[in-house]
Image (tube, helix red, strand yellow):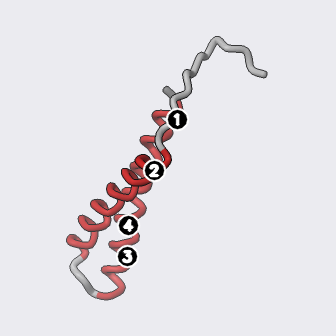
Amino acid sequence: MLLKMEDELLDYATVCATGLICLVIALLFGWSFIAALIWGCLTGAVQAGAIRLIHGREQIDFDPQAPVA
């Protein structure tokens, strides 16, 4: 469960970071920043999906009662 939450957080961070990078590039070159933000979020979502498709998600059963080695 903990790993799944971390994976989803990483997906959201990838989407947000890509969107912000596109926004900064748009502001530097004087492009439409709304379109750049939307494009960045879309490409970030595709990037996060591609990472998950290629690497997959490990399924680890988290047992809080298990002894720590």
Relative vertical location of residue 18 with respect to residue 29 in this rendering, above or below:
above
Where is residue 49 shown, x and y percent of the image? 37, 51
Relative vertical location of residue 31 with respect to residue 45 in this rendering, above or below:
below
Tag 2 near tag 3, CB within 8 Å: no
Whole-angstrom CA distance, mark 1 to mark 3, is: 34 Å
Badge 1 local density, few (<14 within 10 Å), some, or many (20+)? Answer: few
Whole-angstrom CA distance, mark 4 to mark 1, is: 28 Å
In the displayed structure image, the side of residue 12 where residue 3 appears, left or right: right
In the displayed structure image, the side of residue 40 where residue 63 appears, left or right: right
Q: Secondary structure at mark 3?
A: helix
Tag 3 residue: 24
The residue sitting at 25% across, 75% down in the picture is: 33
Relative vertical location of residue 53 with respect to residue 27 in this rendering, above or below:
above
Q: What amino acid is at disc 1?
A: Glu
* Residue reaching furthest to the right: 69
Whole-angstrom CA distance, mark 3 to mark 4, is: 6 Å
Tag 4 residue: 20
> Which numbered disc, 1 or 3, marks the residue that appears first in the sequence?
3
Q: Foreground residue, 18 or 27?
A: 18
Badge 4 local density, few (<14 within 10 Å), some, or many (20+)? Answer: some
Q: What amino acid is at disc 2?
A: Ile
Whole-angstrom CA distance, mark 4 to mark 2, is: 24 Å
Tag 4 near tag 1, CB within 8 Å: no
Badge 3 local density, few (<14 within 10 Å), some, or many (20+)? Answer: some
Tag 1 residue: 58
Badge 2 local density, few (<14 within 10 Å), some, or many (20+)? Answer: few
Tag 2 near tag 1, CB within 8 Å: no
Q: What amino acid is at disc 3?
A: Val
Tag 2 residue: 54
The picture quadrant where one finds residue 14 is bottom left
